[in-house]
Image (cartoon, helix red, strand yellow):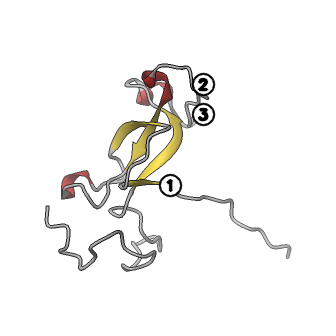
Amino acid sequence: GDYTADKHLITARVSSYPPNDFGLFDMAGNVAEWTSTTWTPAGFKLINDVNPELSYQADYKDSIDRTLKVIKGGSWKDIARYIRANNRTKAPQNAAHSYIGFRCVRSAVEFSK
């Protein structure tokens, strides 16, 4: 890939690009998102609206297969077809990669009327 085409030699600062149609910034392309969801090849069969997350807290003595977490989206190192929100892959929960990060999410603040 042409990793410098966007004029950033490393990951770009937050809000370097315009927001999407929903007003959200940086939803794809900087780093892939490490999630708390446990990886399984049958993930889509086990996860649904009622049970949106599959969780297993791996112990350090567990095999590598038991420590895998879901990685969503694409990153600066991926070709264009992998920079999609529905891209799903895996990585061990104790591995560090320059192309995987995490997103902080919080509930909306409600104001009294």
Q: CA separation, marks 3 and 1?
A: 24 Å
Q: Residue furthest right?
A: 112
Q: Secondary structure at mark 1?
A: loop
Which is more N-terminal, label 1 or label 3?
3
Q: Secondary structure at mark 2?
A: loop
Residue at the image position 26 percent from the left and 73 percent from the top: 9
Q: Secondary structure at mark 3?
A: loop
Residue 30 drawn at (x, y percent): 36, 64
Q: CA separation, marks 2 and 1?
A: 21 Å
Which is more N-terminal, label 1 or label 2?
2
Q: Residue furthest left?
A: 1
Residue 75 drawn at (x, y percent): 32, 57
In this rendering, the answer to whether 63 lies above or below 83 is: above
Residue at the image position 19 percent from the left and 73 percent from the top: 4
Q: CA separation, marks 2 and 3?
A: 27 Å
Foreground disc of the pair 2, 3? 2
Foreground disc of the pair 2, 1? 2
Q: Looking at the image, which is closer to me, 66 or 70?
A: 66
Which is more N-terminal, label 3 or label 2?
3
Q: Looking at the image, which is closer to me, 47 or 65?
A: 65
**Amino acid identity at mark 3:** Val
**Amino acid identity at mark 1:** Phe
Residue of label 3 = 50
> Callout 3: 10 Å neighbours few (<14), some, many (20+)?
few
Residue of label 1 = 102
Residue at the image position 52 percent from the left and 37 percent from the top: 37
Foreground disc of the pair 3, 1? 1
> Callout 2: 10 Å neighbours few (<14), some, many (20+)?
few
Residue 91 lies in quadrant? top left
**Amino acid identity at mark 2:** Asp
Residue of label 2 = 59
Q: Looking at the image, which is closer to me, 45 or 13?
A: 13
